[in-house]
Amino acid sequence: MTAMAIYPILIHPDPRLKKVCEPVDDITPELRKLADDMLETMYDAPGVGLAAPQIGILKRLIVLDCVKEEGEAPKPVAMFNPEITWESDEISTYEEGCLSIPEQYADVDRPAIVKARWLDVDGKVQEEQFDGLWATCVQHEIDHLNGKLFIDYLGSMKRQMITRKMQKLKRERTRT
Ligand SMILES: [Zn+2]
């Protein structure tokens, strides 16, 4: 076994965060290792979800674990080629953030309950219904695979303001 790796997370704006990612054909040992490394990277950040393009890998793979309660067992999930197969008419609003847009948060409306279908690490098809934070997170992460960020749901003024802050943050980070 090789050791877990923690990847650097791309910060918006970055052209790789705007790309439509490629589906995965079969789940190779390399892809299983990548899923483990992405979970490790997500827990380290810390965050509740991470999509492969956020580490510069343009494949349809997301990981999530929205268990937030202290003392509750973690529930790591890796999804290859995830798709939303059903969504509720009911909408819920969550204050979202993103590991590629650090320390910026905004309310986003999305379907409150969704069903998602994906391939698991063993290549088996899974389908599950999600609500609460899990529903928000799975939709946010699948958006990443289509080059969409949560700030794309905001008005252009707010989006530009956040983008300028991120450009400044990136300049500061390269200087130090
Ligand atoms: Zn994100």
Image (spheres, rainbow, N blue to C red):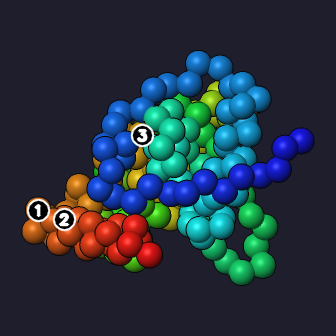
Q: Amino acid at mark 2?
A: Arg
Q: Mark 2 — residue? A: 159
State the separation of the CA atoms marked 2 and 3. Answer: 19 Å
Three-letter amino acid code at the position of disc 3: Leu
Q: Residue sitting at 65 percent across and 20 percent down?
A: 26
Crowd tier of the residue under label 2, counting other residues whose Cα lies within 10 Å: few below 14, some 14–19, many 20 or above: some
Q: Which mark sits nearer the N-terminus, 3 or 1? A: 3
The amino acid at mark 1 is: Ser
Of 86 and 117, nearer the camera is 117
For mark 1, give the secondary structure: helix
**Quick check: marks 2 and 3 in contact, CB under 8 Å?**
no
Q: Is residue 43 visible?
A: yes
Does the Cβ of the disc 2 residue fall within 8 Å of ligand 1? no
Residue position marked by numbered label 1 in the rendering: 156
Question: Which residue matches tag 3?
Answer: 145
Number of other residues with Cα within 10 Å of mark 1, as a class: few under 14, some 14 to 19, many 20 or more? few
Q: Quadrant of the N terminus?
A: top right
Confirm whether residue 93 shows in the render.
Answer: no
User: For the point 58% across and 34% down, which residue is it?
Assistant: 80
* Position of residue 10 measured from the top left corner of the image (x, y, whole percent): 44, 55
Q: Residue furthest toward the bottom?
A: 70
> Horizontal placement of 165 versus 158: left or right?
right
Q: Quadrant of residue 71?
A: bottom right
Please report the residue visible at 51 percent of the width from the left and 38 percent of the height from the top. 57
